[in-house]
Amino acid sequence: MSELDRTAVLNRSAVAALAAELRPVPAVQAAATGIVHLGLGAFARSHVFDFTADAVEAGGGDWGVLAVAPRSAATVAALRRQQLLSSVLIRGVAEDRIRVNGLLRDARCAAEEPAAVVAALADPAVRVVTLTITEAGYRVDPVTGVPRPDDAELANDLAALGRGIPDPDRVWRTAPGLLLAGLLARYRAGAAPVALVSCDNLVGNGAVLAAAVRGGAERIVAGAGDAARGGLLDWLADRVTFPDTVVDRITPASTEADREQAARLLGVRDEAVVVGEPYRQWAVVDDFPAGRPAWELAGARLVDDVAPYSAVKLRLLNAAHSLLAEMGLLLGCETVADALDRSVLADLAGRYLRSEAQPALDSPLDLTGYVETMLARFGHPRLAHRLDQIAVDGSQKLAQRIVPTIRVTGAGSRGLLVVAAWGVRCRRRVLAGVPLRDPRAAALAGAVTGADSAAGLLELLAPDLAADAGMRSALTERMAGLDRDPAGYLRSC
């Protein structure tokens, strides 16, 4: 443990005094930027940057990262004060350890420096663009699989691109708008191929990103009245790839206590520290037309198809997270570990996984071993993974995580109980005047306070299920039971 200097901050001068095992990874900073990352949240720093730092340490290459925060400048400012260094506090069951990441070459806020970000996306030296923009950030309708036609911010961005070369200082309101501005500049410059890599928790995340980009480009070309821009679609098809990925590392929100712990371990303050569990996993389709970091040397799995990994992650791990979050919040729990301490929730989670979600999956992977490892991870007593963090964007998450199992197991599924808990919790928030944290907040508020809440909720998640009278009736009964006596009703299920 280093001696703490409360006046010192993590920077490149301070690391010279660190013990060898605490010095930044990679030890030698990449000479050039080869990756732009959109979405500078905690998960990117605990997972994507951590894997990539290890890959560059092991395999070399000019794979420095320009990290882009879409709107918030706070993390960018913190990283710049620390000369782009930050750490991952790896929270073990018994003790913590810390790693300093030296991968970043620059950090920008797109809302404040849009021209610089667009120029970076068009730079031929940039061969990979990674994204962690959350499920809602893609602006793609989960039912139709195309960019939302009713999304005013997206429409505004695409219209600006369709009118010609936009003002370089224009602030893009959506991630697809910003990305397309960079790709359009790249296309005009005849730049090298590039891989766009979604690292968000979505089934077929590469396909979702492709739909956002290609669908947006079609709207740009259709509205442009410019035949030359028609070549953009062919260029996207020939020169841009969208590899699917599956990511996994529990990353709870950092607290002041975490920053204090990081300072004790490093001897200096790190205002950008993130917390992660020891476990991490990354499966990536190996489709990179201009090269990539040697992620396999860092433990990532480079594969032809991530579908088995994606289905297992979303329908077991992420589904169990949503189950514990929605039911746990109704019972007053705050973290995943708190929820698992409630025997009724631990029992429900176990039965849902083993008797419904697991049998509903046709997978070549070891599902029994996966479930047991996963539940052990969830029970980590020192990893304060907040339920309210997990429950954000429920309309997006439950459609991906819970609905596929309901389709197999029917109206008797405990998955429908998760939907019911979500509906009851959201209704209580609306009636209490508390805003819903969901990309479809207005529609969700209308659904949970309407005359037929069950139909409204199912319509948001899966319109075909809303047409099933038995499904609507079962959901109505579960919502009534949870609203009346959450703990008692759950014990009866």
Image (tube, helix red, strand yellow):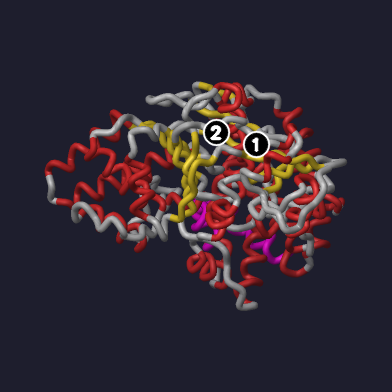
Q: Are marks 2 and 1 in contact (CB under 8 Å)?
A: yes
Q: Which mark is residue 220?
A: none
- Residue under the point 28% across and 45% down: 217
* Magenta-tinted stretch: 456-481
Q: Which residue is mark 2?
A: 29
Disc 2 secondary structure class: loop
Horizontal side of 425 relative to 137 (left or right) equals: right
- Residue under the point 73% across and 50% down: 268
Rendering quarter of residue 36: top left
Residue type, numbered disc 2: Gln
Q: Position of residue 275 (x, y in %)?
A: 70, 47
Q: Which residue is mark 1?
A: 24
The reply to whether residue 335 is in sight is no
Q: CA distance from mark 2 to mark 1?
A: 9 Å
- The front one of 157 and 22 is 22
Q: Main secondary structure of the magenta part?
A: helix
Horizontal side of 365 relative to 128 (left or right) equals: right
Residue 232 drawn in magenta:
no
- The front one of 374 and 311 is 374
Count of picture labels:
2
